[in-house]
Image (spheres, helix red, strand yellow):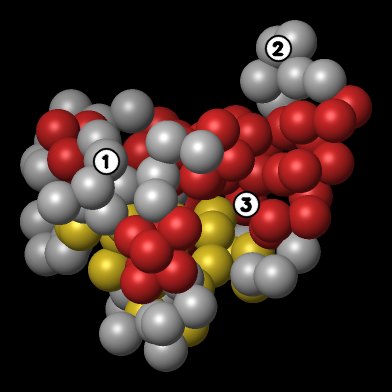
């Protein structure tokens, strides 16, 4: 099982809102786990982020692979946006999961439900 971890799951993990057991299940116990470059942008681009918080994020992400935003992913995101009302970052993250053959781990099921063929898993359930 390969898992692409959505931004909100990282936020919950850093804030301590996601149990360590649930986080380990979707990351360490997976065949592969990573995050989109868009997730890094969303995490580090958050207004008011402190140096301490930035350090925690860097430390956590360092253990995982970042999926770059490629032309193939952008093309897939364009097709997604033509079919469904999905925000650009979510279309790119969803397209990344589809292109790399991953489950998308997110608590925002509603944001991704319109993306055809995307397997979405809520780590809180």
Which residue does the image show at 17% across and 64% down from the upper left?
119
Q: Position of residue 34 (x, y in %)?
A: 53, 67
N-terminal label among 1 and 2: 2
Q: Is residue 19 above or below residue 50?
A: below
| Left or right of 110 on screen, residue 58 | right
Q: Is residue 6 above or below residue 100?
A: above
N-terminal label among 2 and 3: 3
Instruction: Pick whichever, 72 or 3, lies toward us.
Output: 3
* Residue 107: numbered disc: 1
Q: Are marks 1 and 3 in contact (CB under 8 Å)?
A: no
Q: Are marks 2 and 3 in contact (CB under 8 Å)?
A: no
Instruction: Pick whichever, 73 or 45, lies toward us.
Output: 45
Residue that carries the numbered disc 3 in the rendered image: 37
Which residue does the image show at 76% across and 64% down from the upper left?
62
Q: Few, some or many C-alpha atoms within 10 Å of disc 1 (few <14, some 14-19, many ≥20)?
A: some
Secondary structure state at the residue bearing disc 3: helix
Q: Is residue 6 above or below residue 96?
A: above
Can residue 56 be seen here? The reply is yes
Residue that carries the numbered disc 2 in the rendered image: 47
């Amino acid at each position: 099982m390969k898992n692409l971890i959505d931004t909100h799951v990282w936020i919950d993990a850093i804030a301590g809102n996601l149990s360590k057991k649930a986080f380990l299940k979707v990351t360490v116990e997976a065949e592969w786990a990573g995050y989109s470059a868009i997730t890094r942008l969303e995490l580090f681009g958050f207004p008011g982020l402190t140096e301490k918080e930035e350090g925690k994020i860097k430390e956590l992400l360092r253990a995982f692979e970042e999926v770059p935003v490629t032309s193939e992913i952008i093309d897939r995101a364009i097709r997604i946006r033509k079919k469904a009302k999905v925000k650009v970052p979510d279309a790119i993250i969803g397209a990344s999961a589809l292109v790399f053959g991953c489950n998308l781990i997110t608590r925002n099921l509603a944001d991704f439900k319109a993306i055809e063929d995307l397997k979405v898993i809520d780590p809180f359930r």
